[in-house]
Amino acid sequence: MQDFYSKHPKILRAFDILLPFIATLAALGVGAVMLMVFDANPVVAYGALLEGAFGSTNAVADTLVKATPLLLVALGICIAFRGGVINIGGEGQLLLGAVASTLVGLSNPNMPGYLLIPLALLVGFFAGGAWGAIPGLLKAYFNVNEILSTIMMNAIAVQGMNYLLRGPMIDPVQLESASRIPQTARLSAAFDLPRLIPTRLHLGTGLAIIAAFLVFIFLWRTVVGYRIRAVGLNPNASRYAGINVPRHIVLSMLLSGAFCGLAGAIQVYGLHHRMFTDGSATGFTGSAGFNGIVVALFGQLHPLGAIPASFLFGALIVGANKLQRVMQVPSSFIIALNGLVVVFVVSADYWRRRLARRREAEVVGEVTISSEAEVPT
Amino acid sequence: MIAELFTTTVLVGILASGIRLSTPYLFASLGETFGQKSGVLNLGVEGIMLLGAFAAFYTTFITENLWLGLLAAIIVGGIMGLAVAVISVTLKAQQGISGIGIYLFGLGMSELLFRKTLGTVEIVSGFSSIYIPFLSDIPILGEIFFQQNLLVYFAYIMVPVSWFVLSKTTLGLKIRAVGENPEAADTLGVSVSGVRYFTQIFGGVMSGIAGASLSIALLNVFQQNLTSGLGFIAVALVYFGGWRPLGVLVGSLIFSMVNALQLWVQVLNIPIPSDIAVMMPYVLTILALVIAVQRVRPPSALTKPYERGG
């Protein structure tokens, strides 16, 4: 085995990249068993899934639309994880960005679109950033575990959103009607992000891809990005090197939240054109705040790797919606399947680390082998 | 209207329901305390609670036997705990993220099962109140403490039991050793994986019972996302309680009292928006974490998988 791998280093690299795919397939395999338990033919079901994701121009466009928030959240997650902070608060940060940017659009209905859209996206970016900075500050200066604080911040954001959408921000039309659906009025059509082709595909997808390149340049080609990665790799060494560690922890959480917030703003201006709630976070986010984490891991925590990863997961979600319609499988199946994918992808990392160790061992091994060669047997 | 909160009836009501509402927190947090003491963070408590709650409810609904319902929750919780152990201990996955996966799985799976089996919200008659002879006759105190259902008493018995096991037994010593210094424990012949598998399965069982305490003792219904964030608070309570059963008890009580207060505020129509009232426990959790973390240090090996010779 060792010989095989040392002769073919490319196979090892390919395996690194293939591993998340294998893990996802395994999760889909478990999903197939679940489908069979519920009397659904998994072959037909996954066929519907594929067709739903890629079957037509509209399907591909929908996949790209679903991939957009996933990519933006994943970029945020890349920054946080590279900085050594685990941001589980994407859901809340996304909601904050969505609510804040909606407020901008609702309160300035007469502003020209070319001014308002950038302003609203920027507000969404910073609102998410502020929401992310709070757990960052708590971690950096009060040593509060960011996993727990971001989860609590998610719950607070959901309740805040529910309050605003049921009260101050509710659509006046809904206020009159008996149903009182908790949603805002539709934003002025002048504020819609331009559509790219006659599908749901909007400019936000392009913005997200540009953002991926910007994040790559930021993390690998700027001093601040370098410091964030240094803090993530070794906070103690960074401290000795004179880097202000707490400040960079806050910064990486702020930027992480900001990209999640931007995702929320783009969901509003590109897709929904209003803010709504079903009482939970998932109603608006579709769990993008959590799924973005998997996308980021899938892309090996690399901003450019997140681009294809988000496309794959976008396809999975769009396809699953189709599956739900065709096979009458409740949408909760998709949530459970999502969970399985998360578990399988993070667990599969075990084999990657094992191979990495074997590679290290080989370097040491070669030395021993050459010294042994002198000894006659 | 605020004054209505301070009549004896209402105050007793708040305290009694506070004690009752603390059961799910207690079961889940005590189980999680064992896990974290051994160095494993299980963030998926919420998902396991949901599956346990469904298992208990459905079994009770079909068999009309509460004990079978409880047993179902224990088995489901144990299986999920085993899964967490495989993921976190054997495969050494990043615990913060795999826990979210477990949560999403539990959230989706419990709702899927609910839709496929029951379809609509049904009611079962859960564990009824047991009046402890003599003690329950004490005015006020009797009503607060000694007219509760069986699982409430069981949860409170588990507090000293957990304390005793963790502080006074060899098993507890092993758990603490594995969580503080796994290398040393390993050198002394303690199976690090073995201990962690045990605490994760135990934690899963406790989370399952926590779910059952909601679905067949407190609320006696099952619906989607029944736990609504309670399991995440339970994880935070372990930090708040400083990884000590008694601290966990104090934390659970504070939270359930705030919850009870918030319910009564709604019952009495006091004009605080319910969304804001529901938000309060979470804000409180963050504040509590800020204060708690300054006092105690988490187990050294928490969230760090053990690698022999690494």
Image (cartoon, coloured by chain):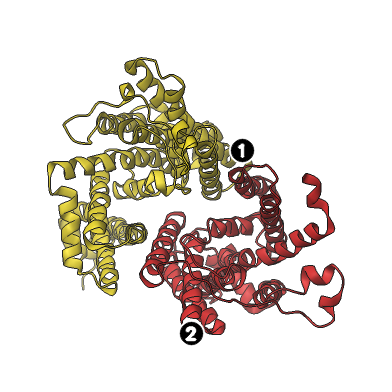
The disc placed on residue A141 is 1
> B307 above or below B66?
above
> Which chain is assigned yellow?
A
> Which chain is assigned red?
B
Q: Which one is in front, A97 or A349?
A: A97
Label 1 resides on the chain identified as A
The disc placed on residue B63 is 2
Which residue is at 23% across, 40% downward? A64
- Camera-near label (1 vs 2) is 2
**Disc 1, SS:** helix
- Local packing at callout 2 (Cα closer than 10 Å; few below 14, some 14-19, many 20+) is few
Which residue is at 29% across, 46% downward? A299
> A60 above or below A320?
above
Residue type, numbered disc 2 = Thr
Place residue B125 in its image quadrant: bottom right
Point out residue A285 in the picture as x, y percentages from the top left corner. Answer: 39, 44
Q: Quadrant of the C terminus of chain A?
A: bottom left
Residue type, numbered disc 1 = Tyr
